[in-house]
Image (cartoon, rainbow, N blue to C red):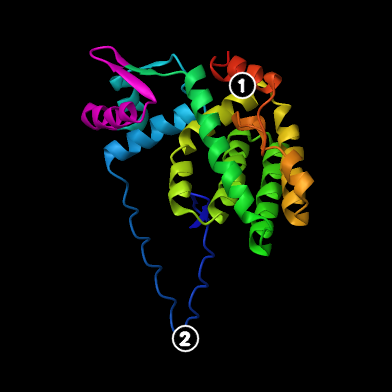
Amino acid sequence: MRTCCIYAVLMPSPSPAPPLAATGSAPSAPSPAPAVKQPPAADRVYTHVKQGVLDRRYEGGTLLTEGELAEAVGVSRTPVREALLRLEAEGLIRLYPKKGALVLPVSSQEIADVVETRMLVEQHAVRKVVPASPTLIARLEELLDRQKEQAAAGDLAGAAVTDRCFHAEIVRSGGNEILSRLYDQLRDRQLRMGVAIMHSHPDRIAKTLTEHAAILDALRTGTPRRRRESSISTSTGSPTWLGARSDEQQQFEFRFLAVPAR
């Protein structure tokens, strides 16, 4: 298993070569594969619903029922209730007794709060990482290449995750663990906003790639003027890198992120 920022990504391991049978002896029967232990039922429901909200299979305003979710995941209703309580505590849904769970849309206030918090954290972090280390540059190059592949394949959800990883790497490289944890707490909101805006404006991904290339170039060269002018990708409703957002960006974010896509 490898980690992309704070996201665990399962990578297939190479299969071991079968042992050579001794000359003249019959090959031994293959050993049965060990059974894979599933996560608890409530965790499976939690992951199913949360991923559906983040990638917009369950859009804001969707009413989810316990019966539908139990059938979708293949569990009883008891773990569904437990999972929904966790999701309500995280602010992704609102429970209505005897009716179900309403997926909450992204509000204008939430967008403004996330953007403001990101601005404070990212501006501080980028000042600390310049001049950027070769390790950080190599990691950002890897993420930019991955995002280009995802964009070419039309994988908007994957591109949103990689976009978030790109900026999280810069924040982490600032060396402040408290700020890194604070930034990680924005993860789900950033991903949800990122996927929403990419679906509303699919051409946004091309601009994101251009902006990421400019950020990488500025970090690579360490030119102060370039650092000030470089911008963080607005694909997640974020501010310019070291400056205030333009009115056009604000209107763009509030117009498309607060309204579920049709």
The amino acid at mark 1 is: Glu
Figure quadrant of residue 29: bottom left
Magenta residue check for 84: yes
Quadrant of image for the C terminus: top right
Front one among 18 and 35: 35
Q: CA distance from mark 1 to mark 2?
A: 68 Å
Image location (x, y in percent) of residue 98: 23, 12
Q: Is residue 215 left or right of residue 92?
A: right
Residue drawn at x 41%, y 68% is 30
Give the x, y percent position of residue 219. 72, 52
Which numbered circle lies on residue 176?
none
Camera-nearest residue between 30 and 226: 226
Give the residue at the far left of this rendering: 78
**Residue span colored magenta:** 75-100
Q: Secondary structure at mark 2?
A: loop
| Residue 6 on image: x %, y % | 48, 49
Within-10-Å neighbours for mark 1: few <14, some 14–19, many 20+: many
Q: Is residue 200 left or right of residue 103?
A: right
Q: Is residue 213 visible?
A: no
- Which numbered mark, 1 or 2, is in the foreground of this view? 1
Q: Residue at x 34, y 60 (%)?
A: 34
Left or right of 57? Residue 221 is right
Q: In this rendering, is residue 114 above or below 248?
A: below
Is 132 on the left or on the right of 173, as rendered?
Answer: right
Query: Badge 2 is on which residue?
Result: 22
Rendering quarter of residue 83: top left
Where is residue 45, by image quadrant? top left
Q: Which residue is mark 1?
A: 253
Q: Nearer the viewer, residue 250 or 13?
A: 250
Q: Secondary structure at mark 1?
A: helix
Mark 2 residue crowding within 10 angstroms, few (<14) / some (14–19) / many (20+): few
